[in-house]
Image (cartoon, rainbow, N blue to C red):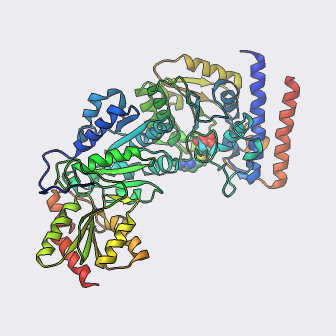
Amino acid sequence: MKNETLNRLKLLASEIRLETMKIIASKGNGHVGGSLSIADVLAVLYGEVMHYKPEDPDWKERDWLVLSKGHAGPAMYAALGIVGYYAKEDAYHLNEAGSDFPSHTDHSKTKGVDLTTGSLGQGISQAVGAALGNKMQRIDSHVFVICGDGECDEGQVWEAAQFAAHYHLDNLIGFVDNNGRQLDGTVEEVMSHGKGIGAKFDAFGWEVIDVKDGNDVKEILEAIHRAYEIKDKPTMIILNTVKGKGIDFAETSGEHSSTLNAEQWKVVIAEAERKYEALKEELS
Amino acid sequence: MYKLAKEHTNDKRNNRDAYDDAMLDMMKVNDKIVHIDCDLAGCINATRIKKDFPERFFNAGIAEANAICVACGLSATGIIPFVHTFGVFASRRAFDQVFLSAGYGERPIHIIGSDPGITAAFNGATHMPLEDCGLYLNVPNAIIMDPCDYAQTYVLTKRSAETDSLTYMRLIRRSFKTIYEDGSDFEIGKGVLLKEGKDVTIIASGVMVYNAIKASELLKEEGIEAEVIDMHTWKPLDEELIIRSAGKTGAVVTAENHEVNTGLGSAIANVLAANCPVPQEFIGIHNRYGQVGSQDFLEKEYGMTVEDIADAARKAISRK
Ligand SMILES: Cc1ncc(C[n+]2csc(CCOP(=O)(O)OP(=O)(O)O)c2C)c(N)n1
């Protein structure tokens, strides 16, 4: 793995964080914590791993990304804007009346979003369907899906898991954003996962890869390369992440959604900009 | 074009095979069509589909919510999925999935809910969908169908695949009365004027079409000329036909195998109230749960017999 690649991905993750803050700031409030925790996996997917054509979003041979934790939409909008599906500024209209950028990812509204999510548990099932459809049609591609650890409370996640294993969907690679928090508190407090989410997916017949630092682009990339080698079953990559990663107030509070005033947003965006520029400087 | 059967006797075939026949005919020429079942394939003989097209038959197990969303994902890749389970589960159990992933998500998947209303008979209350269409009526742009016999089930299955919409079709499983001759054609959203009359309009669908025809014969003996409409599509509703007929007869009876407060009768009442208010009587289930019993017993229990429809017609006429 080239250092050059890793540096590029690190910088992209930082830019995704910056853009995500600008997008959420345009509305004033939103799901800051759960968007920030997936910035690194989005950077690896859009910056290195996935095949896609922004000018042809429906390109048949593309890789798919389904954001099953649809409330992290702003992070996906940031990534899609940076890689050219639209101008970055287009997304600075989060949840405005008539906006193409609702807080939850919406196929009917936003270029580059393949499936509509927001009701937790449904995205992974749809991703399973897309993987099955591509396999049936002998399309050589991958479907990626990102779930929340809280989302894994939903029974439907496990219905999807058993289906994907039963039909040997090795073109499906999932991630659990294992940031340890959900809406009402920590996952341990609200609804714990017995022997762990990874152990559950293992029991359901998936290959499970545990990524110690789920906010490290190198570890994420290595895990995906390992997943590519797995045949006959789907893979779930458990990303041990930090909710709110990379922005001080969010990382400290670990809160699910955040409301700041205009002045506070200025400070947050300045922080994200400073970190982005410093990293750029450091890596150049 | 349709042709009424000369006699409305019991079909020798099980109605569920109309669905399988249509699927097999379509699957032969269109390799995008798939059937997904929720461990109930045997109940509608879809094992025939599995036998002929094993690579396009998927059992999702007893997991209806997932089955609906898997169908949406398949549809996103260009596949045309049909999903079957009992009507109760196709509606109540997976409604959020239907509403958001399929409806709002703009995925034209085709959902088959078998054992509509009282045809669930001895499976009883837990398996008797009296509110399935009512739920689907809330889904913007969904298509809802309640076919009455073999010929109509066959055609509407095929028509579903041609649409670009989410569709929900009720499927009578067992042998039932033949209303139409095979080869009849039907259009989604276009009701069938089965019989012209001037005194009252009876609008029915599904298993109630037979009773509506019989009620019109009973009324004829008293000199009452009833117009009979088979409203196989509940949504989009054939408003033009309703308004034209009600305008002519001045009285309406709706007859449905469903809860009247959220079903065909209510949908038609909306149209009448806005366009040509006339007296309307409602045949169907009134604020009750299902229960075990033969279809005949349940028809009596819920006031859905031929005589009940005739009574309702007399009452509607008297209220003019
Ligand atoms: C079916 C459903 N129930 C409830 C919600 C409301 N909700 C949105 S996000 C959330 C918590 C999600 O936690 P997690 O999946 O861990 O996401 P993260 O912490 O990474 O943001 C809840 C309860 C929802 N969107 N869908």
Residue lying at the far front in this picture: please name it: B1
| Residue A121 shows up from this direction | no
The relative height of residue A164 versus residue B293 in the rendered view (above or below) is above
Residue at position x 38%, y 79% in the image: B277
| Residue B228 shows up from this direction | yes
The relative height of residue A231 versus residue B59 in the rendered view (above or below) is above
Residue B105 x %, y %: 52, 47
Residue B132 x %, y %: 35, 56
Residue B128 x %, y %: 27, 55
Total number of numbered discs in the rendering: 0
Is A169 on the left-hand or right-hand side of A29? left
Please identify the quadrant where the N terminus of chain A is shown: top right
Q: Quadrant of residue B262?
A: bottom left
Residue at position x 80%, y 55% in the image: A261
Is A34 on the left-hand or right-hand side of B64? right
The relative height of residue A208 versus residue B250 in the rendered view (above or below) is above
